């Protein structure tokens, strides 16, 4: 099977550390060309792999190239709609890093364009959507009766050595919420992947670090479309503290607790029983082996979809990723309105 030629747009840190290694070992793709607004950076990137044959002078050139099968666009969120328009104009499949747009109006336009052009494959790179944990937690939740509530908690210390702090688009974010949307959509992909869509939000946000460029912690009360109520706590901007990440779902016949704190095994604890006084109580521990923490799995799914023309395994559609960004938007709107309940906007 001939591999698909990929043009990499945006040759910065994540392209170097994540995308290029994934493409180099992929059975579906090969890095073929690249582009950066600063051409010298693209030329330096091209030296990292001998299969990279071209460096373009403009973004339009990328999409005009008949040898390109997929454009892998690592762009600041405010430029994704423009890239999608070029993909549609030149009938090129495109993969875009999250979040899918800088704000809800842009995201609506993004979804509209995508819907109107089904012949162009549009794939959003939110790799948490492809975690093994999502399906395993869902199976566990099916055993605890009716799920009524949840707690989603992801907090930690501020990382002064974060390489991405030096990038201008994160220092002065044009995407809503800065890190709250940039990283928050990952967290919400896990939450909604298990429990489904969120309907309403009541939240407060604050900015702790000047380096974040915007509010960087969020504390929210959510109600899902299925009727569960729960909390979403997110932010890694604190002082000295332990990084703590867990997701707990409570039902009338048990509970599911998922610990995904770094530095330890990712473990699901399933407790069943309690529906009645006589219901047997049991505890089961499920350790998730070899979780898909890199970008490998999402590119594998995309490669299968493009090669077989079967998109059934594609989770990260524009509509799904719109919802993740829309929850962040509702969190920010609620905080601005002193915690008032806000509806999560649909595309």
Image (cartoon, rainbow, N blue to C red):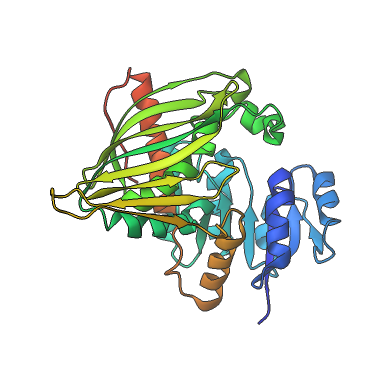
Residue 103 vertical position relative to residue 54 in the rendered view, above or below: above
The quadrant in which the N terminus is found is bottom right
| Along the line of sight, the residue nearer the viewer: 48 or 158 | 158
- Apparent side of residue 291 relative to residue 69 in the rendered image (left or right): left
Residue 163 vertical position relative to residue 124 in the rendered view, above or below: above
What residue sits 13% from the left and 48% below the top? 277
- Apparent side of residue 52 relative to residue 242 in the rendered image (left or right): right
Q: Where in the figure is residue 320, as x and y percent of width and height?
A: 40, 52
Asked if one can make out residue 320 in the rendered structure from this viewpoint, the answer is yes
Asked if one can make out residue 93 in the rendered structure from this viewpoint, the answer is no
- Apparent side of residue 249 relative to residue 189 in the rendered image (left or right): left
What residue sits 67% from the left and 68% below the top? 26
- The quadrant holding residue 202 is top left
Q: Where in the figure is residue 43, as x and y percent of width and height?
A: 84, 51
- The quadrant holding residue 330 is top left
What residue sits 21% from the left and 53% below the top? 145
Looking at the rendered structure, the number of numbered marks drawn on it comes to: 0
Q: Where in the figure is residue 114, as x and y percent of width and height?
A: 45, 56
| Along the line of sight, the residue nearer the viewer: 236 or 309 | 236
Q: Where in the figure is residue 107, as x and y percent of width and height?
A: 44, 43
What residue sits 47% from the left and 51% below the top? 267
Residue farthest to the bottom, as pictured: 1
Residue 38 vertical position relative to residue 54 in the rendered view, above or below: above
Residue 304 vertical position relative to residue 116 in the rendered view, above or below: below
């Amino acid at each position: 099977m001939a591999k698909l030629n990929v043009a990499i747009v945006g040759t910065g840190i994540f392209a170097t550390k994540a995308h290029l290694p994934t493409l180099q070992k992929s059975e579906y793709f090969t890095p073929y060309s690249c582009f950066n607004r600063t051409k010298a950076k693209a030329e330096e990137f091209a030296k990292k792999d001998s299969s990279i044959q071209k460096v373009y002078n403009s973004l339009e050139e990328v999409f005009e190239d008949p040898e390109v099968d997929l454009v892998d666009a690592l762009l600041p969120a405010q430029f994704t709609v423009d890239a999608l328009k070029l993909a549609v104009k030149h009938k090129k499949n495109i993969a875009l890093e999250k979040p899918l747009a800088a704000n809800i109006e842009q995201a609506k336009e993004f979804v509209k364009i995508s819907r109107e052009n089904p012949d162009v494959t549009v794939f959003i790179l939110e790799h948490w959507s492809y975690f093994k944990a999502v399906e395993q937690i869902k199976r566990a939740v099916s055993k605890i009766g009716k799920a009524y509530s949840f707690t989603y908690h992801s907090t930690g210390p501020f990382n002064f050595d974060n390489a991405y702090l030096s990038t201008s688009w994160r220092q002065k974010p044009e995407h809503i919420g800065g890190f709250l949307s940039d990283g928050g959509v990952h967290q919400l992909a896990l939450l909604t992947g298990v429990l489904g869509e969120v309907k309403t939000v009541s939240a407060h946000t604050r900015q702790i670090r000047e380096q974040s460029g915007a509010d960087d912690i969020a504390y929210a009360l959510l109600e899902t479309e299925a009727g569960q109520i729960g909390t979403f706590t997110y932010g890694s901007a604190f002082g000295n503290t332990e990084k703590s990440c867990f997701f707990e779902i409570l039902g009338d016949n048990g509970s599911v607790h998922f610990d995904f704190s770094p530095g330890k095994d990712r473990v699901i604890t399933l407790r069943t029983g309690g529906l009645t006084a006589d219901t047997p109580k049991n505890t089961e521990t499920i350790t998730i082996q070899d979780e898909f923490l890199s970008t490998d799995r999402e590119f594998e799914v995309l490669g299968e979809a493009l090669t077989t023309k079967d998109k059934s395994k594609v989770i990260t559609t524009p509509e799904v990723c719109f919802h993740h960004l829309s929850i962040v938007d509702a969190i920010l709107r609620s905080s601005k309105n002193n915690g008032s309940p806000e509806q999560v906007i649909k595309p």
